[in-house]
Amino acid sequence: MPRLHETVTTRLPLDETFAFVADFANAPAWDPGTATSERLDAGPVGSGARYRLGVRMGGRVAPMEYRIAGWEPPVRVVLRGSGSGVQAVDDIRFAAAPDGGTVVDYTADLRLTGWMRLLAPFAGGAFKRIGAQAAAGMRAALDARAAGAPR
């Protein structure tokens, strides 16, 4: 099972960082691997909230559905996703940084299913690039919010 792990430090305060990242409707703003995201239900973001994402896989965009499976504001959110030959558990933890910003610790456990599981032994490098690009995108989006850039 491939595992992605990235740590991002931002100047954006803890509560604002949690609210932005934990709402997966914002994923296209920070994850270049996410083409689209929409909330599938109504109400406040929290446990059970569901999202449909369009995830870039090779030269196509594949659908995935995510559900918030763990909700501990403002320190942790866990999302479970499935679709297009992959299942994912994203465990995102947030901690206040000494300078008033936030440290985001992001772990994604991926399981390739169906015929895609045959690619698992060869996918490590690609997944590592995906994780690094998502971390860079998250850092840029959060720092832009901290600087007061248009949101």
Image: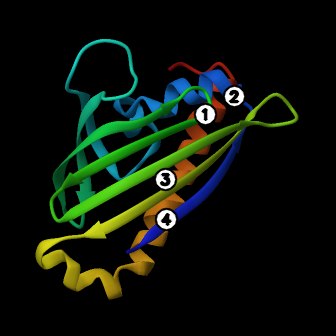
What x and y, as percent, mark residue 94?
64, 38
Q: Which mark is residue 142?
A: 1
Answer above or below: position of 18 versus 4: above
Judging from the image, what secondary structure is the residue with disc 4 in? strand
Judging from the image, what secondary structure is the residue with disc 1 in? helix
Tell me what residue is drawn at x 37 percent, y 75 percent.
1
Q: Amino acid at mark 3?
A: Ala
Disc 2 or 4, which lies upstream in sequence?
4
Q: Residues within 10 Å of mark 2 (few under 14, many from 20)?
A: many
**Relative to 37, is 127 on the left or the right?**
right
Tell me what residue is drawn at x 35 percent, y 79 percent.
123
Q: Which residue is mark 4?
A: 4
Q: Are marks 1 and 2 in contact (CB under 8 Å)?
A: yes
Q: How many marks?
A: 4
Q: Residues within 10 Å of mark 3 (few under 14, many from 20)?
A: many
Answer above or below: position of 45 versus 54: above
Gap between marks 1 and 2 measured at Cα: 6 Å
Disc 1 or 2, which lies upstream in sequence?
2
Q: Amino acid at mark 4?
A: Leu
Q: Which residue is mark 3?
A: 134
